[in-house]
């Protein structure tokens, strides 16, 4: 009784698995296109952005540095802008804000990757499952034909097996682009975190240099400097005093 019920399920299971694989493939393609546009629209030249940011800060134009970051659509610029807002709190505060910014945006950069990775790993097995069900159905028909005295129709059996193997082919076809996309977009998400780390290190290094110039021992060398003097002016004054000494 149980075997008969399972055979009845196998007769419709092969086609059902094939339709499931087609639906998963369509879903996978939609995620791939969305992720491609997401990363493409947020591309950034990290070295150029770092040069622009440091030049603005070197000129004492913190508002210009913020405007340059706001003008970029990249995730790196968003994180750096949030860190720059904490500039007056010191390097340690900025570092923590940058770490928070990366974590807050990780869900956005990794959205859909879990599905792509899961599909890439399991789609061939889903297709193989459909193939097994199709082969079971084909041999069931062969057994029924042999029992009826017809000797079995080998052409129909071979045709059924060939149709069953389509499920495996579709499973592999669905897995390949999913795996490629998963690896590619995972790399891009990692590159964003690396860029934020690099840009953040440049910003924090500049801030620590700013703190050095504000040290009382350094200020003693800068005679007559204005409290609102820019970092560039103070740096030039220190260098000049040291050269004269």
Image: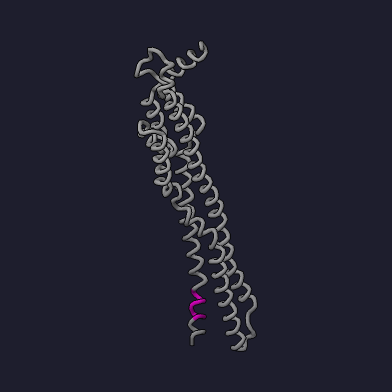
Confirm whether residue 66 shows in the render: yes
Name the one closer to the observer, 38 or 221: 221
Name the one closer to the observer, 178 or 117: 117
Name, please, the residue furthest toward the top: 244
Task: Write the residue at 41% across / 31% down.
Answer: 69
Name the one closer to the observer, 60 or 193: 60
Task: Write the residue at 55% across / 74% down.
Answer: 133
Name the one closer to the observer, 156 or 206: 206
How many marks overall?
0
Q: Left or right of 123: which side holds 225?
A: left
Asked if residue 7 is among those painted magenta in the image, a careful observer would answer yes
Asked if residue 31 is among those painted magenta in the image, a careful observer would answer no
Confirm whether residue 49 shows in the render: no
In which quadrant of the rendered view does residue 66 lie?
Answer: top left
Task: Write the residue at 43% across / 21% down.
Answer: 217
Position of residue 209 measured from the top left corner of the image (x, y, whole percent): 46, 27
Position of residue 175 measured from the top left corner of the image (x, y, whole percent): 55, 58
What's the magenta bit mostly, secondary-structure-wise?
Answer: helix
Position of residue 231 measured from the top left corner of the image (x, y, whole percent): 42, 21
* 191 in relation to 179, above or below: above
In which quadrant of the rendered view does residue 156 lie?
Answer: bottom right
The span shown in magenta is 6-12
The color scheme shown is: one colour
Position of residue 196 measured from the top left corner of the image (x, y, whole percent): 47, 38
In which quadrant of the rendered view does residue 58 lie?
Answer: top left
* 142 in relation to 201, above or below: below
Task: Write the residue at 45% across / 53% down.
Answer: 112
């Amino acid at each position: 009784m149980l075997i008969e019920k399972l055979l009845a399920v196998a007769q419709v299971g092969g086609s059902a698995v094939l339709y499931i694989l087609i639906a998963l493939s369509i879903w996978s393609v939609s995620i791939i296109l969305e992720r491609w546009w997401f990363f493409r629209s947020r591309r950034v030249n990290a070295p150029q952005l770092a040069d622009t940011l440091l030049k603005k800060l070197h000129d004492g134009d913190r508002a210009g540095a913020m405007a340059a970051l706001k003008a970029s659509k990249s995730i790196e610029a968003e994180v750096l802008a949030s860190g720059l807002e904490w500039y007056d709190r010191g390097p340690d505060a900025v570092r923590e804000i940058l770490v928070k910014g990366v974590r807050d945006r990780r869900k956005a950069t990794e959205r859909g990757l879990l599905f792509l990775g899961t599909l890439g790993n399991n789609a061939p097995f889903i297709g193989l499952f459909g193939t097994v069900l199709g082969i079971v159905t084909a041999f069931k028909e062969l057994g029924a034909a042999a029992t009826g005295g017809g000797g079995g129709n080998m052409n129909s059996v071979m045709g059924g097996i060939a149709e069953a193997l389509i499920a495996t082919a579709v499973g592999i076809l669905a897995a390949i682009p999913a795996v490629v996309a998963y690896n590619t977009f995972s790399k891009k998400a990692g590159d964003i975190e690396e860029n934020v780390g690099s840009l953040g290190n440049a910003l924090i290094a500049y801030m620590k240099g700013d703190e050095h110039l504000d040290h009382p021992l350094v200020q003693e060398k800068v005679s007559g400097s204005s409290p609102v003097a820019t970092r560039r002016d103070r740096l030039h004054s220190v260098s000049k005093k040291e050269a004269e000494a």
